[in-house]
Amino acid sequence: MQSNQLTEQGQLRHFLTIEGLKKPMLTEIMDRAEQFSGITQRQVKKVPLLRGKTIINLFFENSTRTRSTFELAAKRLSADVMNFNISTSATSKGESLLDTLHNLEAMHTDMFVVRHDQSGAAEFIAQHVAPHVSVINAGDGCHAHPTQAMLDMFTIRRHKPEFHNLRVAIVGDILHSRVARSQIQALSILGVGEIRVIGPQTLLPRDCQTLGVHVYHDMDQGLKDVDVVIMLRLQLERMKGALIPSAREYYRCYGLSPEKLRLAKPDAIVMHPGPINRGVEIASAVADGPQSVILEQVTHGIAIRMAVMSMALGAQQQETDT
Amino acid sequence: MQSNQLTEQGQLRHFLTIEGLKKPMLTEIMDRAEQFSGITQRQVKKVPLLRGKTIINLFFENSTRTRSTFELAAKRLSADVMNFNISTSATSKGESLLDTLHNLEAMHTDMFVVRHDQSGAAEFIAQHVAPHVSVINAGDGCHAHPTQAMLDMFTIRRHKPEFHNLRVAIVGDILHSRVARSQIQALSILGVGEIRVIGPQTLLPRDCQTLGVHVYHDMDQGLKDVDVVIMLRLQLERMKGALIPSAREYYRCYGLSPEKLRLAKPDAIVMHPGPINRGVEIASAVADGPQSVILEQVTHGIAIRMAVMSMALGAQQQETDT
Amino acid sequence: MQSNQLTEQGQLRHFLTIEGLKKPMLTEIMDRAEQFSGITQRQVKKVPLLRGKTIINLFFENSTRTRSTFELAAKRLSADVMNFNISTSATSKGESLLDTLHNLEAMHTDMFVVRHDQSGAAEFIAQHVAPHVSVINAGDGCHAHPTQAMLDMFTIRRHKPEFHNLRVAIVGDILHSRVARSQIQALSILGVGEIRVIGPQTLLPRDCQTLGVHVYHDMDQGLKDVDVVIMLRLQLERMKGALIPSAREYYRCYGLSPEKLRLAKPDAIVMHPGPINRGVEIASAVADGPQSVILEQVTHGIAIRMAVMSMALGAQQQETDT
């Protein structure tokens, strides 16, 4: 898929997927987030960078957590934000998605943050928006969740900055996870030494090897000597589809218990995109333990989103100025 | 109905209906919108004109699109906005409408933007609010939608500034349309040469002639040589009431196809308040075609609402100062 | 219950309950509100005191009125506010309350305004939040509603500043009322001469005498010569539980009619936390009459909430600075 997320000058216009981006771009995003990270710890957690800009959270799928990180990021950049829950809005009057989009655009919107349960939705919208509008993918179906992947990379870099030396394991339902897909791409681009995926046959994509990852069905083997353990959220609805026998059985095989974590390096960090299912994919003792950086991920999510939003709108600005 | 929307000095205090306003007032609104139109295209789309003012969107009827244009207009004037969906709020605890109003007033609210499915609701509220509060009618029943009419006039003026020479046709369900009612009043006040309404007998008001309009049941005749075609949205629920035979039959008689549009002047513009029903009242080829100014209308909606809001609050300010 | 709402220096960190606070603290809150009261009447009703602060309205129980006063108070202090209706959010994905809290905290939230139908919920949350977060109780079960009590004290002080000379009657369902509980505590701390509660046996707490109040079952006796009458809202759902015979019967015994009000002092003021049930606990003639200060209470609610929010965040600031 040829993504139109970069301008001709190679700057970020949309942020739809990690795929196809180069290492300097990912590094620039993280460096920019590092600056915003400082702001977030000041008394006045606000910069006037996007004052007068209009950002619309276009959520076709409910996600309070993700929406609120984007909303906060936008407000801390001094932008005006409007939340749209599309299922309850104009489309119920029979208006087509594109008509809704073009209407919102016509109000001089600068950015859409899009969440959708269909893979490719953000890309579709980016292909149809006016030249003055940026699109940020906040998760589309099983396809991509690039800001989540970048906040994960940022979190890893904070603890283990030498990517090429790292051994990273992603555990769980890789097959249906937009988070995992984006993470694997980002880890590859950043040159991580070894990427492992751990899960049952039924929850791994068939083309796993072509992704450049090592596949493990046995968690004990997969966790051995890793520096980073990324647990995925178990979508409990998968159990209805008989892909997973039971929560208890899943935990026994692929849940991260303190014992299993001991197989990783002693200073390994534990990550999870949240919200966590305690006792299903992760033990409370691990989630709340000293190796967990799960809440740091949430904090970094704001900085990463501020970085991506300001870059996308900044890039545009330059295009317009020329 | 004697409307109390002007102050003793003849300035806008509320904006409830076009009826009874004079041409200079409509012109002032459009001139003010012209200024705001420039702001909307700047990098920082914001002026501090209403900083520290509190505006409440009081929506008794759901309308994401209209609410969001008012919300954006208020934010671009730097006001604080709160959205109230009244059906889900205090009235469910058995509080009367007036008690809710007086409570919101007591919080030092400066303006209510009111949407209601009952004709006269905005007027009723304006009669009961405290002297420091302005009311803007964002559509009440079949009665009026004055900001929509003004954005339409503004759009026409941008393309055809000589109102007295114009021939304007409004097509569709005039009878139930608050938009049409307000448009006809505005077109008359601005001295438009000829106003036509086109629709089946069942969807035209009985007193059409007294409105000073020419009535056509045949669309081909009605569109002949007009400068502006205003299509109304077909309320599909009218079909249940047997007022309309079927969507297909309606389109055949009163839908705007490329062929029908050819009967108008070659440089005629096509307008629609949105959201459009493609293939019902308007063909996609027309809605997306070169004569369509439908998305311009949306853009101008922000500027017109900024104009009306700032005038209503400015007028008050002067009253208080004196 | 030992509440952790004060810092070691005795400053307000959280605001959970009136219980245990000293008179100077209540006076400081009212004095601070007096300053904000002036701001609310200016053209620009806004101060930059909490610019860059993030305040989250965490409402587990729906209350448009209370939420909007906190939202307005926060906006007039220039803070960024996000509304969370928790029943519809992450907890529906099976996330625990504490995980949701810690996630919101990790976004560098400065304050939670908490409304919950369980007594003790705000205290529980305050015990678990990170050191940088303040908690304001916006009503928890039958336990406390401290900002309501303070706005009531503020309203009384505006009209009758000599607390020790006052005779105050609270009428209605004292047993289930968090408002009454907080009011009685505040009146006691401020040294009000005589506090009376009036209601049927079934709606009075058993330990009434230990609260230092005088109990009346007969309203005529109870209202005699009082300076302040505080009516409580009748929770109509109590009638199902057979605690109250009928609305009409209730009004006959404990409703505030113009005749009953005549038993109080001629300059007595009438208060009600709202929303009022006209003709159930209060006659319209009284609610809208010259002795009613019900809408003043709403106005003062904004100033009190601005005071408490700024004090809680200011106190913290000093703690951090030291």
Image (cartoon, coloured by chain):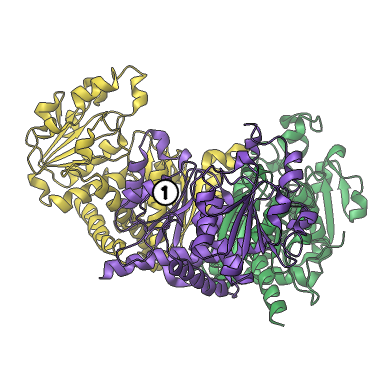
Chain colours: A green, B purple, C yellow
Q: Secondary structure at mark 1?
A: helix
Q: Nearer the viewer, residue C69 or B201?
A: B201
Quarter of the image for the C terminus of chain B: give it: bottom left
Place residue B108 in its image quadrant. bottom left
Where residue B310 appears, as percent x and y from the top left, is: 43, 67
Place residue A32 in its image quadrant. bottom right
Where residue A306 appears, as percent x and y from the top left, is: 62, 65
Determine the chain carrying the residue at label 1. Answer: B
Location of residue C126 with respect to C108 vertically, above or below:
above
What type is the residue that disc 1 sits on? Answer: Ala
Q: How many marks?
A: 1
Residue C116 lies left or right of residue B142; in this view the side is left
Q: Nearer the viewer, residue A12 or C144?
A: A12
Residue A80 visible in this rendered orientation of the protein = no
Where residue A43 appears, as percent x and y from the top left, is: 46, 67
Q: Nearer the viewer, residue C175 or B245?
A: B245
Residue C100 lies left or right of residue C34; in this view the side is right
- x 36%, y 36%: residue: B95
Q: Which residue is mark 1?
A: B122
